[in-house]
Amino acid sequence: MSKELLEIKNLKTSFRIKDDYYAAVDDVSLTLNKNEVLGIVGESGSGKSALAFSVMGLHTRAKIEGNINFKDENIANISPAKLNKLRGEDMAMIFQDPLTALNPLMPVGEQIAEAILLHKKDMSAKQRREKVVDLLNKVGIPRPEHTYDQFPHELSGGMRQRIIIATAIANQPELLIADEPTTALDVTIQAQILDLIRDLKEDMNAGIILITHDLGVVAEMADRVAVMYAGQIVEIADVETLFDNPKHPYTRSLLNSMPSEDESQDKLHVIQGIVPSLQNLPRKGCRFSARIPWIDESAHEENPELHEVAPGHFVRCTCHNHFYFPDESKEEQVNGVS
Amino acid sequence: MAFLKVEDLKVHFPIRGGLFNRKIGAIKAVDGVSFEIEQGKTYGLVGESGSGKTTTGRAIVGLNDITEGKVTYEGDELNKKGKAIDPRRDIQMIFQDPYSSLNPKKRVLDIIAEPLRNYEKLSRQEEKNRVHELLEQVGLSPESILKYPHEFSGGQRQRIGVARAIALKPKLIIADEPVSALDVSVQAQVLNFMQDIQKELNLTYLFISHDLGIVKHMCDEIGIMYKGRYVESGTKQDIFNNPQHIYTKRLVAAIPDIDPKKREEKKQFRQEVQTEYEQSYNDYFDNEGLAYGLQSVSDTHLVALPEKG
């Protein structure tokens, strides 16, 4: 079998507002290999979570067009019964907020056991408990036997996220989608959870889609990174290229707006304007053009497409060739590139 | 005389239970914290959730009762009863969540004018003019005056929160995680803007945050809290270039690095620090797991170490 685990082709996920459908994910194509972490970065409203939910089949009212090929089968728009067989067994999700993702009235061990019960009906209750304790051990929970019978409110945020991870990996899925897995956690806990996810990946040989708005997390975790803006992928490259040699104006603006190590920089870069809402998304031309008004219109393509600028490095639109930050002079920028 | 001086601040919350619901214990949210801020500077208060950093900020504005200790603001003690003037008019707060800190049923005019109505007797027209001025200062259009909070984006809402905080021309602003709920680009906008008005109005900030990257960008001096106590305090350089306490080292090590090439290096460093943390835990914390008293390492740099160390 090929190395490819997941192939998304021309995916379009639209939501209905009043009488019209608006695409939150607009023509996205991606591939994910086994034992690979693909980071998806973007601000809120860029469609990154909508993309993940489409893969997991968690949208109930959205219109999904295009193909999602998982293990050589198109899983877009398959029946809920078929999806239920896949979810939890072959693919699983780690959610952002560990408190709302857990059932407050059920001991955490039981919740993990439930995931096993649904897919492996022939296991005895005793075996299941052993397996859960084993899992708890694996995600680094001290005293797993005791924790099995505890309720979510008795555990700290980091411990709860470990429970979520244990549930997700209970059946050794091949595809793991982590939607902002550490956003709700403290930095030291974040570092521990990221290390844990990385170790588990090695163990299970799984493919991971990591969705986050935190570029630091992406730099630490991902093998390849896709940057999303307004429902489209604007740049995709392996992690080192993306951080060393970002091309698209949006990627460069994002990197520039982070407080950096170098203290000489006094002001942070601000991206003009706001992320457009779903109904007001510009559907024609370069979607980012409204936020870089100082760039001449002729720099943009009429129908921006992803261009391969280097092997494996794709950038949408041609405006990156002419892009400069307003606070630096144009000549300086051109010289800097050459 | 220091601009704001906090001396041995303690905020304890009672645990009630047993017969007649008596006090049977206390949660020591803030347990003996002292620091000073100079006018026009930004002081960062850093810690993980539950460290007591927010409670400290709230106690200074008066949103939590002070159990023990003294907060002096320009020489006036804040928690004394029966004062002639209310210094709290000079101290304002910016809250973390721009979605829940604005009343959804009020218009922007009423939100920003509320502190003015409490402290200044202005006519309707004067009040409106003042609100217009404030909106201009935070970069919002004058038409927004009749809108409701839900009509704004996160960054704009945070600006409304800032406009309300600076309405009375305060001298000290306590900013409790002002950008945690915002996207990176909006975060940059709010931080830049906070620096601008700081220069313009000669404001002093007490900047409460868990994000060391932002603290490094914004603050002149930093205090690190753990379980209600200080573990280390000093200038930005002291904390980031020469951290002494193992807890600070651990925090600094946990910041994700933006350079993917240093990934392995960083992981190894984290593990080293973690091992050191586990091995030397008893050297840095007492039997209750709390930090020791502060010892000075240099003129500006204080670290919580046991007496003899």
Image: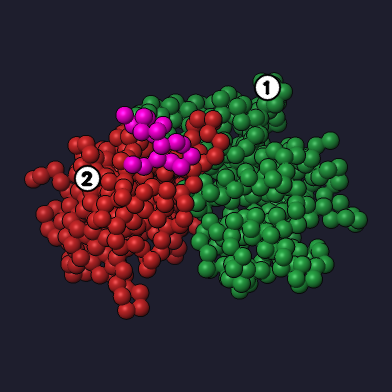
Relative to A185, A11 lies left or right? left
What amino acid type is highlighted by mark number 1? Val
Above or below for A247 versus B148: above
Q: Which chain is indicated by disc 2?
A: A
Relative to B52, A226 lies left or right? left
Q: What label does residue B297 carry, if any?
A: 1
Image coordinates for residue B95, horizontal then vertical, percent:
62, 55
Disc 1 and disc 2: Cα gap in Å?
A: 56 Å
Indicate the colour of chain A: red
Give the class, few, some or many, for how many residues have Cα within 10 Å of label 1's Cα (few <14, many ≥20): few
Asked if residue A332 is among those painted magenta in the image, a careful observer would answer yes
A105 vs A60, nearest the viewer: A60
SS class of the residue under badge 2? strand
The residue that appears at 27% across and 60% down in the rendered structure is A26
Above or below for B288 versus B282: below
Q: Nearer the viewer, mark 1 or mark 2?
A: 2
SS class of the residue under badge 1? loop
Q: Which residue is mark 2?
A: A307
What amino acid type is highlighted by mark number 2? His
Residue A110 falls in image quadrant: bottom left
Residue B53 in sight here: no
Question: From the image, which quarter does the N terminus of chain A lie in?
Answer: top left
